[in-house]
Image (tube, grey):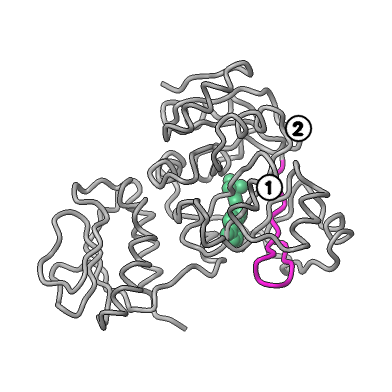
């Protein structure tokens, strides 16, 4: 059963997060579904609880800019924006540091990471007490409206998460502004709580994507991963492999097929949460190591479509799609 924790139970909420449990928490925008961002299984459990049919990158929350910038590379613009708007509803997309501790699944396999310092006293108290980066998408089932009260969170996620930290109603109610600073320029990825004009007053021109029609928006929201330049392996990917060749690198699920030149086990026991947690690291490993060994292809064993399997298969289908 999902526990409802009061403002005096921040220490317990922090303890749950540190042990890999999911805890929803209030921010000034909406309630977030928090998990230890370093822990791939905890992050996989977030996608599972939300019922998302694909992996999209999650925002990582920190108690201050210094702890955020320990994980990502901040340039002068990022520092100026952090000084102006953090804590607050601004999310910055920045390159991961090589020593970044955030699990690859939290960033959906990307080389960039979205970071933010929320302006809510309970969120900040929780982040300080937990002293870990906390990945948190909105605390609702996929496709449902973002929750602005603990009741909303429980309506969607009761029984699926360990606890909700009840901080009453959120003030902003709209999500954070997402700004991409990772590609040199500054691009608005999502309008939100901090107006783009206020950002431009600090760092100059921000490029805005063209206005999109409502139909397109729905499609985008259904598959935000399509909008991102996801990491794609260099080696071609063959799906549904039921035998493996010596010149192939095998992405195994369950007892591995014999004969492959290299094997990465997603989950020996067929545990989808473990498989999700090991997916992006596995693709990177098979690609790099397989390339070094002169292998010509990645062969992926079949994965059931149930639960997290749908998101894993969605990602594998993209990795296998013809390159343009
Ligand atoms: P939510 O977690 O539901 O508030 O949504 C997070 C938003 O941030 C989504 O629109 C993501 O697509 C976006 N986002 C998170 N990380 C990245 C990233 N590394 N690159 C681009 N967009 C990101
Ligand atoms: Mg959301």
Relative to 85, does residue 224 appear above or below in the rendering?
below
Q: Give the camera-side residue of 216 and 320.
A: 320
Query: Which label was assigned to residue 171?
Result: 2
Give the class, few, some or many, for how many residues have Cα within 10 Å of label 2's Cα (few <14, many ≥20): few
Residue 220 visible within the image: no
Q: Nearer the observer, disc 2 or disc 1?
A: 1
- What residue is rendered at 52% in x and 55% in y? 100
- Residue 193: x, y in percent? 76, 46
Quick check: is 180 in the magenta stretch? yes
- Residue 127: x, y in percent? 61, 34
Query: Taken as a whole, is the magenta stretch helix, strand or loop?
Result: loop
Query: Which label was assigned to residue 66?
Result: 1
Residue 186 visible within the image: yes
Residue behind label 1 places its C-beta within 8 angstroms of ligand 1: no
Q: Which stretch appears magenta?
A: 174-188
Q: Secondary structure at mark 1?
A: helix
Residue behind label 2 places its C-beta within 8 angstroms of ligand 1: no
């Amino acid at each position: 059963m999902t526990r409802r924790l009061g403002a005096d139970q921040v220490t317990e909420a922090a303890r749950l997060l540190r042990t890999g449990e999911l805890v929803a928490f209030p921010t000034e925008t909406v309630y977030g579904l928090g998990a230890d961002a370093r822990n791939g299984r905890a992050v996989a459990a977030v996608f599972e609880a939300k019922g998302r049919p694909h992996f999209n990158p999650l925002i990582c929350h920190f108690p201050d800019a210094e702890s955020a910038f320990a994980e990502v590379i901040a340039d002068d613009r990022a520092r100026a924006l952090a000084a102006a708007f953090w804590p607050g509803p601004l999310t910055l997309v920045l390159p991961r540091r090589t020593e970044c501790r955030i699990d690859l699944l939290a960033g959906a396999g990307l080389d960039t990471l979205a970071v933010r310092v929320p302006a809510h006293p309970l969120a900040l108290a929780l982040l300080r007490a937990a002293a870990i980066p906390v990945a948190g998408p909105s605390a609702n089932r996929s496709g449902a409206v973002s929750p602005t009260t603990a009741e909303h969170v429980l309506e969607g996620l009761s029984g699926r998460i360990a606890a909700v930290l009840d901080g009453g109603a959120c003030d902003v109610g709209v999500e954070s502004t997402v700004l991409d600073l990772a590609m040199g320029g500054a691009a608005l990825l999502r309008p939100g709580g901090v107006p783009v004009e206020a950002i431009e007053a600090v760092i100059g021109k921000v490029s805005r994507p063209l206005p999109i029609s409502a139909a397109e928006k729905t499609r985008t929201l259904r598959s935000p991963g399509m909008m991102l330049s996801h990491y794609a392996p260099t080696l071609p990917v063959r799906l549904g492999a039921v035998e493996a060749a010596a010149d192939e690198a095998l992405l195994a699920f369950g007892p591995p097929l014999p004969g492959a030149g290299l094997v990465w086990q997603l989950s020996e026991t067929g545990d989808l949460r473990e498989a999700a947690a090991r997916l992006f690291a596995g693709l990177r490993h098979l690609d790099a190591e397989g390339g070094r060994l002169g292998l010509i292809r990645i062969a992926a064993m079949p994965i059931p479509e149930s639960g997290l399997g749908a998101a894993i298969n969605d990602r594998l289908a993209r990795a296998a799609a013809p390159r343009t």
